[in-house]
Image: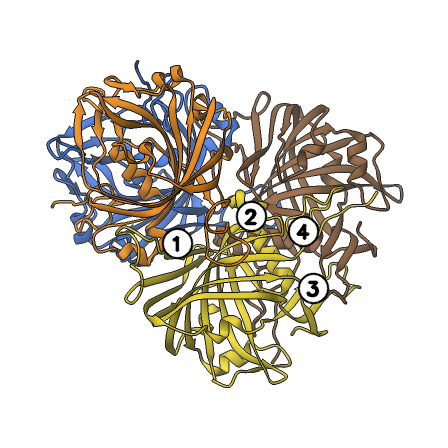
Chain colours: A brown, B blue, C orange, D yellow
Amino acid sequence: MTLFGYTLPLSPSGRSSLVPPPPWHFSGEVVMVEYLADPDVVTSFMPPGLEPGDRPGLAAAIFGDWQSCTDDATELLDPVRSQYRECYVALAATWQGEPVARCPFCWVDKDFSLVRGLIQGYPKKMGSIGITRAFGIGRATPQDGAGAQFAGTLAAGERRLVEARVALTAPAPAPALMLAPLVHSRCFPSWDPATAGVDELVTGGSTDQWIDNVWAGDAELTIFDSPHDEVSLLKPVEVLGGYRFSFAETIAGGRLLSATGR
Amino acid sequence: MTLFGYTLPLSPSGRSSLVPPPPWHFSGEVVMVEYLADPDVVTSFMPPGLEPGDRPGLAAAIFGDWQSCTDDATELLDPVRSQYRECYVALAATWQGEPVARCPFCWVDKDFSLVRGLIQGYPKKMGSIGITRAFGIGRATPQDGAGAQFAGTLAAGERRLVEARVALTAPAPAPALMLAPLVHSRCFPSWDPATAGVDELVTGGSTDQWIDNVWAGDAELTIFDSPHDEVSLLKPVEVLGGYRFSFAETIAGGRLLSATGR
Amino acid sequence: MTLFGYTLPLSPSGRSSLVPPPPWHFSGEVVMVEYLADPDVVTSFMPPGLEPGDRPGLAAAIFGDWQSCTDDATELLDPVRSQYRECYVALAATWQGEPVARCPFCWVDKDFSLVRGLIQGYPKKMGSIGITRAFGIGRATPQDGAGAQFAGTLAAGERRLVEARVALTAPAPAPALMLAPLVHSRCFPSWDPATAGVDELVTGGSTDQWIDNVWAGDAELTIFDSPHDEVSLLKPVEVLGGYRFSFAETIAGGRLLSATGR
Amino acid sequence: MTLFGYTLPLSPSGRSSLVPPPPWHFSGEVVMVEYLADPDVVTSFMPPGLEPGDRPGLAAAIFGDWQSCTDDATELLDPVRSQYRECYVALAATWQGEPVARCPFCWVDKDFSLVRGLIQGYPKKMGSIGITRAFGIGRATPQDGAGAQFAGTLAAGERRLVEARVALTAPAPAPALMLAPLVHSRCFPSWDPATAGVDELVTGGSTDQWIDNVWAGDAELTIFDSPHDEVSLLKPVEVLGGYRFSFAETIAGGRLLSATGR
């Protein structure tokens, strides 16, 4: 017999796999706050070969309200299989002189996204993420344009970890930290001590990036201490500003940069 | 001492109340399927004084992706306090000759919405609701306009209860069952057997209704049997069509129709 | 037609009611910390007619790991319908000279328990509650007897609110605050401004209380500030000690004490 | 810089890892139903090298109510980090003539357990699992001994997938399928198409197994069809009986059986 599946669970048909094989398509809306963390702490989160970016301590807290699907897009008709929310931190970095981004922490609220992320090297845990939405009408929505306020919130392990707020002021160009290629560490421990686990430095495989309706504005960002998560090591020493925009991409396999990811 | 609060918990400040006092503002997006249920079953769900509507068995399954807030709208900056999803069934009815709607079943995914609904007479339980979203860009979204497909799904008590799909064909006028005043039974049992509980027929108090971007189309609707919920009594015998639109309203207190709600 | 149901939703059969009619039977395990809060704050949470107890500021944080059912106990075979966890604060009080307990705050993790509690006057919100369990074997459990440590934790609205720990030292008599009759405010707002809402002071209706395997010990208790919950007003100024025990009761209707609950 | 962590997220301290390094200790209670599935289907779920067991089609549905921790057991004092529930299917098999068990499907309700399982080769997804508990007192519990009924339930992706019931009749020896070594396929896809992913057949590493208080009895088992999970391929053709017992083990690294897991 042969068993099939891009991931576990394997089955004769391959249909039970928690994650279907790439390409994966993503559409969504993002609330993002750019800030400066302690540059020494940012450096301490860099894997071998990655250097901090030109602006010491440059980082972002990024909240995404996503749908994802495979080519036939049938997942969109069962939202429990396609919708999820995400919060991650991005650090500005360079790889061999090229600007990239490094993601030290990431949370999502669905299992398929968690494991799909681990395959790419996103360091995902489960969390509860909230992102203010804009509806065209009524009073329970930010109004269009300047002055509109959007929040992103993250809780994990029953504790609030991140709160971000953006008050939009004007249309703006796309933020570089959203578009930079991510350099991830793929880690999967061995089980037999006589064998080696996976420990790779890779780049992400994002293609067909579309960004639209970018507005920038003033921002606030709070990262809370927690007894079990270390994200507050990267708390803001200066908040630079915020963004809200629509974003889409396709992810379809990446490239090995180094045989060691740490 | 005096304790304050629109609902429990009471406190010296009144700030702990699960539900703040009205008015409550709502903005959101709705996926809706109009259908015919068994007319006799529809009649069996009518409280005294309510008559079925002109078209026997006319009903709708309505999925709402909502934000709600009070006048200062601070809830919008902490989405866990303002966002929720809802699925309910609406039955066409008349009260003293006027067209109204009756809601026999309703599910939401947040506690503040559950209790706020019980106060109005919405028969809410907790559930898990999914509603396809439209993003402007990328491949993980229905495209704009004709042909776009949207789904609504409901699970409660660990069982899938309702699945709806709409394939949009053209702009359309607003569906009457969404705009008709709801006639609810407010029920709150007594605790001391020597006292009376609340048992009232009321109408809902919706004002400032705004509806926009209404598209209609073809629809599918499945209502599943469950050992604990009776919603499948109202399963479709004919599906008429579907809608997707933006909706907003303010709810601010209602009107007693009858001293008995059943 | 006539519609039936102890609570909403009403239906021709009455089977859809979120809460079945009493009597309700409860079995479970409790972790409890007795402490002193600021006596003035405790007094500020007393409704008219209730006086603080003899020991100023006496309070308890009580974590319960429950099953509940009606007479035929069929709920026990579908745990989503019978299991829930609870955390509440109890304040020592007297009613006409008799010792009673007052519950200013309460959280549970299931909808049927939330609404069943509101009917009695428990000021319930939804939360996430954790309670250490004892298994007879292995290393992932407190061991039996002296030295065993148990924790209770509460989060609500994505924020950790309460953490309690008890290190058992010896068998002990039952803690009075667990057994004292609760005096609750039943509140259900009116909807038509021309009518009156429910606002009653009642006592709880607990019968057939069984308590077993009571151990006492040293305790820690932390109540965290939150922007939306006021439970930290009742934070400990002195922690007296903790308990762990099994508890069972039947609740079956109560008694009106006063026509005003606040 | 060097980054540490048994799993992602990596950090300078290693403390952020979703899963701490083994050994992991487990204590819990299990409800289990032994049954016969279609032998051809059972065979179709065997990886290369694994043969079905002596009794064609022998399988079990196993529901576990667990605490887990590392050596210092501090996780037990924050239950969100130590408690989880699990449901899995076990198939009787042989490896080189030795009786083993194969797990084709598994669900848990916490992220740390999901990823910890994937490392071992447990094919875990997130689900909602319910398991009837026994409390010593009251009416909301199965009574001790013969006649006590226990249920296990599983939902995933908003659909009920498995329901099991056991009515205990007498103490019994430990069920072999619970104690047999598990043979797992460890699968972790490559990301750079030029590299190889992980695809290993391993055995689980369970040590220090303790089983206690084993009762057997009559059982029922229903496995429901689902559009996205294939567990109903392994539905019962004959239910053999059920068990309830306490179980503990320590898991601490395993052994490679074959360089291919499928």
Task: Point out which mark residue A191 bears.
Answer: 3
Secondary structure type for disc 3: loop
Q: Are marks 2 and 1 on the same chain?
A: yes
**Above or below — where is A6 with respect to A145?**
below
- Give the spatial CA distance, label 4 vs label 1: 33 Å
C168 and B234: which one is in front?
C168
First in sequence: mark 3 vs mark 4: 3
- Give the spatial CA distance, label 2 vs label 4: 13 Å
- Give the spatial CA distance, label 3 vs label 2: 40 Å
Residue B143 seen from this side? no
Q: Position of residue A205 (x, y in %)?
A: 74, 52
Q: Nearer the viewer, mark 2 or mark 1?
A: 1
Q: Which residue is mark 1?
A: B158
Q: Position of residue A162 (x, y in %)?
A: 61, 32
A208 and D192: which one is in front?
D192
Q: Are marks 1 and 3 on the same chain?
A: no
> Looking at the picture, which amino acid does disc 2 mark?
Thr
C148 and C232: which one is in front?
C148
Task: Point out which mark residue A250 bears.
Answer: 4
Chain under disc 1? B
